[in-house]
Image: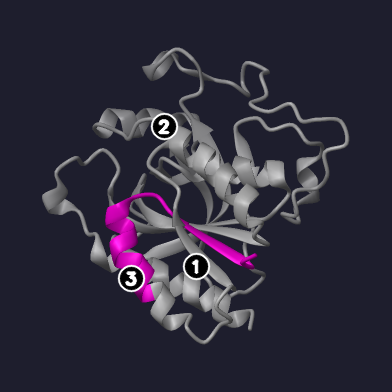
């Protein structure tokens, strides 16, 4: 079984990331790291992550890909770890009328009797139930860039108004993507840690890809993965 399972959402991201990662990880034992697709969006990512964890039984999952920034503090072309992952889009209503599951008092996963600690090292979470937010596993190193909160959405922001509404509902979120919460929840159910790294490719709500950066943030994200794994040797 691999110690590390690196998940990438899309084939376009994998075509860039996989060669860069595996060529640098060649010094590790052959079975130490697996690189796999998890799929695009919250449904595919949840199902595929659970399937891969069940088959491969890794010690840790690392999700890596691109994301859109929700504010200008994050520079395009950079990459960062996230300490927590939140979910937006599962609940009641839409637009300004949206109410999240946790706000309604609903848990996305209530937990089974006897559920153990997921291994994320955050005792403040308390209990096996999952609402709209989960912790991520972040190495205890001061040299790694990190942000407080990443937002997983069921549909990417279509324009500035979507961004404004999301920031109003989840003020701490600094970027949005579409797989992180699903991957983290699958890891929670298997009691293994989940690390999330995202390269910042665009400003959320800007759908003109002429303004996006792809290779620079993916290169930064790959380098961050390698820094983490290299520090564990």
In the figure, 144 relative to 59: above or below?
Answer: below
Q: Residue at x 58, y 73 (%)?
A: 31
135 drawn magenta: no
User: Closer to the N terminus: mark 2 or mark 1?
Assistant: 1
Q: Nearer the viewer, residue 1 or 224?
A: 1
- Left or right of 162 in this view: 127: right
- Residue 145 marker: 1
Marks 2 and 1 sit apart, C-alpha to C-alpha, by 23 Å
Q: Residue at x 56, y 50 (%)?
A: 52
What residue range appears in magenta?
1-20
Outermost residue toward the bottom?
Answer: 27
In the figure, 174 relative to 16: above or below?
Answer: above
- Residue 166 marker: 2
Q: Quadrant of residue 217?
A: bottom left
Q: Nearer the viewer, residue 230 or 164?
A: 230
Which residue is identified by label 3? Answer: 219
In the figure, 143 relative to 154: above or below?
Answer: below
């Amino acid at each position: 079984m691999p110690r590390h399972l690196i998940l990438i959402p899309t084939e376009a991201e994998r075509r860039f990331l996989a060669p860069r990662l595996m060529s640098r990880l060649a010094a590790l034992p052959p079975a130490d790291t697996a690189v796999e697709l998890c799929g695009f969006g919250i449904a595919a990512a949840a199902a595929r992550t659970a399937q891969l964890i069940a088959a491969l039984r890794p010690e840790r999952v690392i999700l890596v890909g691109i994301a859109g920034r929700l504010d200008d503090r994050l520079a395009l072309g950079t990459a960062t770890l996230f300490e927590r992952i939140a979910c937006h889009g599962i609940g009641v209503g839409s637009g300004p009328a949206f109410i999240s599951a946790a706000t309604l008092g609903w848990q996305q996963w209530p937990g089974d009797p006897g559920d153990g600690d997921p291994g994320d090292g955050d005792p403040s979470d308390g209990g096996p139930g999952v609402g709209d937010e989960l912790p991520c596993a972040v190495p205890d190193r001061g040299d790694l860039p990190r942000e407080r909160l990443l937002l997983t959405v069921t549909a990417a922001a279509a324009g500035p108004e979507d961004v404004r509404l999301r920031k109003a509902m989840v003020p701490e979120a600094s970027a949005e993507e579409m797989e992180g919460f699903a991957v983290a929840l699958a890891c929670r159910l298997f009691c293994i840690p989940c690390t999330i790294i995202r390269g910042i490719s665009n400003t959320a709500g800007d759908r003109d890809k002429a303004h996006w950066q792809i290779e620079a943030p993916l290169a930064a994200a790959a380098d961050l993965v390698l820094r983490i794994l290299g520090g564990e040797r």
